[in-house]
Image (cartoon, rainbow, N blue to C red):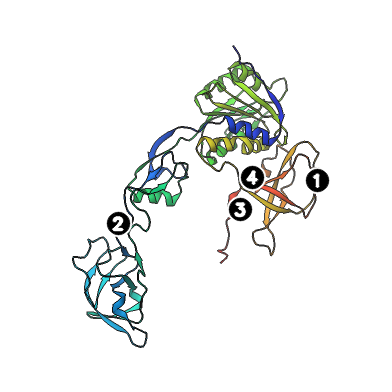
Amino acid sequence: MNPVNHLRTGLSVAEAQRVVLALAPQLGSETVATADALGRVLAEPVVSTRTLPPADNSAMDGYALRCADLAGATRETPVALRVAFEVPAGGSSPERALAPGEAARIFTGAPIPPGADAVVRQEDAEREGALVRMRGVPRPGENVRSAGEDVRKGELVLDCGAELGPAALGLLASLGRTVVAVRQRPRVAVVSGGDELVEPDTAPFDGKIVSSNSYTLSAQCRLAGAEPIYLGIARDTPDALEDRLRAGNRADLIVSSGGVSVGDRDYVRPVLEKLGCTLVFWGVQMKPGYPIVFGRFGDTGPLVFGLPGNPVSAMVTFEQFVRPVLRKMAGHRALFRPLVRATLAHDFEKSAGRMHFVRVFLEPKPDAAGEFVARSTGTQSSGVLRSMALAHGLLILPAAKTRLAAGERGLVQVLDEGFFAAHEPGF
């Protein structure tokens, strides 16, 4: 029997985001090789079983010594010490302490000999046979890495929910952790619908178009940290769509594009209901992308997003609703794209009632470091995919607004975070 649906319609963007995130579960954990865990989210606290570094060691190639032995040393009146022994990197601690008037040749990472309290860089010393002359007095602890300076045994190093970047992976390796528990990646079944669609390796004919949504949506899934599973094109029949949606029932989330409006061949909603999906809402007050449907299969089945078929509408609705859900499922804390304020290069006009997401270029504002100018990429037709390929972000025009004038500042949701990469170091 079909579930009883209490379908909400015409939600605001903020309401729809709250609804989808409230129903999105955090996935369980799995153990992966630390070397393969880049970008994953920790599902366990990591407590150090080691002290790093395990002993005081040298931060430089040079000479370990006692600061007191260089009292009065200046450039004009250097003090000479006898080089008593050498301490190589990777070797054991010296067998004896430095005696007064002695220094030890030492290399980066080598343990500090007992009695020494500083290291002078080799370029700041003058070696002559068994003697080394110093033309200054170092500070106690200079060029010495103290034991436990990085991590102490028993210390919480990384907590649950931490995203594993290169430094975190190196730290795990330093602690001897070759495997680590992380949140599972969401598996996303991707379905495109429409008799007009063909795969890219088929030349379009008789009004056919290439199914670009399968590529854009799969790529957006990967950028969100999920694993897309492409289920192919569903023809415009209820049976064909049902077959595809059934195939996606083992995924964590299903994303389809097309067939969600109110036309004679828009079968997504009735087919989902037939399969036992509880539809939660249809339609969001936004442009592009009003006809979006969201539902779920029971308490433990996959969430389902039926996105519009127009390429830009599909991508924009994915960014606002599907991407935050995938990041929550994967354990991330920061769920949304970054926002920047930008000065508008020209007027932007719209009708009241829906929030608009306008594709824009961002340009650094001349003579104002850290400030930007937003300029439209051109036509805002929901079928012009190139406008998304060119866009650095989406200018957000609030639902109640009808106009933002040139020179005003607006919020831009940044899609291309590479925009912030610099051609020059800037310092």
Q: Give residue 377's position: percent from left, percent from top.
A: 71, 48
Q: Give above or below for 278 relative to 219.
A: above
Q: Give residue 26's position: percent from left, percent from top.
A: 50, 33
Separation of residues labelled 3 and 1 (CA atoms) = 26 Å
Q: Give residue 178's position: percent from left, percent from top.
A: 34, 44
Name the residue that disc number 4 marks: 389
Sequence-earlier tag: 3 or 1: 1
Q: Which mark is residue 54?
A: 2
Separation of residues labelled 2 and 3 (CA atoms) = 42 Å
Foreground mark, 2 or 3?
2
Sequence-earlier tag: 3 or 4: 4
Residue at horizontal 32%, vertical 53%?
51
Name the kind of residue labelled 2 in the image. Pro
Sequence-earlier tag: 4 or 1: 4
Name the kind of residue labelled 3 in the image. Phe
State if disc 1 and disc 4 touch (CB < 8 Å): no
Name the residue that disc number 1 marks: 403
Tag 4: Cα neighbours inside 10 Å, few (<14), some, or many (≥20)? few
Q: Give residue 419's position: percent from left, percent from top.
A: 61, 53
* Image-based side of 178 in relation to 186, left or right: left
Tag 2: Cα neighbours inside 10 Å, few (<14), some, or many (≥20)? some
Name the residue that disc number 3 marks: 419
Separation of residues labelled 4 and 2 (CA atoms) = 51 Å
| Quarter of the figure that contains the C terminus | bottom right
Name the kind of residue labelled 4 in the image. Ala
Tag 1: Cα neighbours inside 10 Å, few (<14), some, or many (≥20)? some
